Image (tube, rainbow, N blue to C red):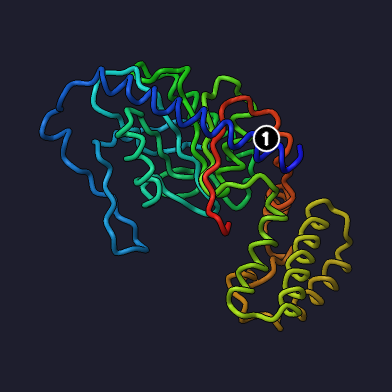
Amino acid sequence: MTLSRILKITFCLSLCVQLGLSAWGQQSHSAAPAAGTAAQREKHQVHDSGQASRFEFDRPPERVTFRNGDVQLTGVLVKPDGVGPFPAVILVHGSGPATHDEPAFVVHANSFLRQGFAVLSYDKRGSGESTGNLEISDHDDLAHDVSSAVSYLRTRSEIAPSKIGLLGRSEGGWVGRLAASRDPQVSFVVMSSGCAVGPYGETLYWTGTSLRAKGVSDRRIEEAVKLKAAVWAFYRKVAEGKISHSAQRRDLASLRRRFSQFADLHPELPPGIMDPDIEDPRKFSAFTHMIYYDPAPALSAVHAPLLEAIGAND
């Protein structure tokens, strides 16, 4: 799929999603009672340990759990006023550990609630009260978690099963699209700071752009980007078993010598390089699957309306 076609599809479908969300929200809102009880109208506080600001769900959150195989996922279902059945949106996490009450999710949830949507937000696997090991999980594992969330909502009588969509932030743009590509009944997909290119190209682009904004010289940026790509290539060889143990030790030592010259470029470069003799081999496999993930097949397979919201400089 060409870039121009992606942009055209994104523009056209974004209008469809906006019109669809508006219509659904108005329909649900018009059927809702004028007001709930005082307890229902009360704000529910959500705290983010990394920020001083306080974020609150506009409606009482109901604690929910659902499963994807051996992984139990815990979160909240927040519903608007009324009796339903409501359209619903599932919030899909960005990279790294994340819980259901991160500030951006609360803001997104309240916006959807005001339009008559129910919102499911859950702790990412290995975070909060959810089980599982995030470090050995890839996009496929995370997409199955999303699919389990969709299946769970379809069991709820107050949710309209044909009006369930996904909002993925950052990495969630890849994960949400992958889940939607496998389920033609997913009603819409929103990518908030998501990306149509793969993690490999997107991350290297971010590395160079961020370092340039810090005033790092073009030559040093080029060397840093090449080093980052070389580390990933090393991980890939380890994951695929295409390198002997002696070659592993030699390549790792060489990469670490090069890496020592860029210790000041954190977080654009990671704090270190994983050692195959120490780390769980599944980490190398999961990382390789994620960084070399090709989003084009999933993007082409999504038939639901898709809205991409992205910053001008992203």
Relative side of 240 to 211, left or right? right
Q: Is residue 31 above or below residue 245?
A: above
All told, the count of numbered labels is 1
Which residue reaches farthest bottom? 261
Query: Is any part of residue 228 visible from this angle?
Result: yes
Q: Residue at x 42, y 28 (%)?
A: 21
Looking at the rendered image, the quarter that the C terminus falls into is: bottom right
- Where residue 157 appears, x then y in whole percent? 36, 16
- Tell me which corner region of the image, top left, top right, bottom left or bottom right, holds residue 245: bottom right
Q: Residue at x 39, y 23 (%)?
A: 23
- Where residue 242 appears, x then y in whole percent? 88, 55
Relative side of 49 to 142, left or right? left
Q: Residue at x 22, y 44 (%)?
A: 44
Q: Nearer the viewer, residue 158 or 274?
A: 158
Looking at the rendered image, the quarter that the N terminus falls into is: top right
- Where residue 55 appears, x then y in whole percent? 29, 51
Relative side of 14 to 283, left or right? left
Q: Nearer the viewer, residue 291 or 82?
A: 82
Query: Is any part of residue 125 visible from this angle?
Result: no
- Look at the numbered disc 1 and give the secondary structure of its residue: helix
Residue indicated by mark 1: 299
Relative side of 269 to 116, left or right? right
Q: Is residue 247 above or below residue 8?
A: below
Q: Is residue 66 above or below residue 192?
A: above
Q: Nearer the viewer, residue 13 or 121?
A: 13
Q: Residue at x 45, y 25 (%)?
A: 20
- Tell me which corner region of the image, top left, top right, bottom left or bottom right, holds residue 85: top left
Residue flagged by tag 1: what amino acid is it? Leu
Which residue reaches farthest left? 38
Q: Residues within 10 Å of mark 1 (few under 14, many from 20)?
A: some
- Where residue 47 appears, x then y in whole percent? 29, 55
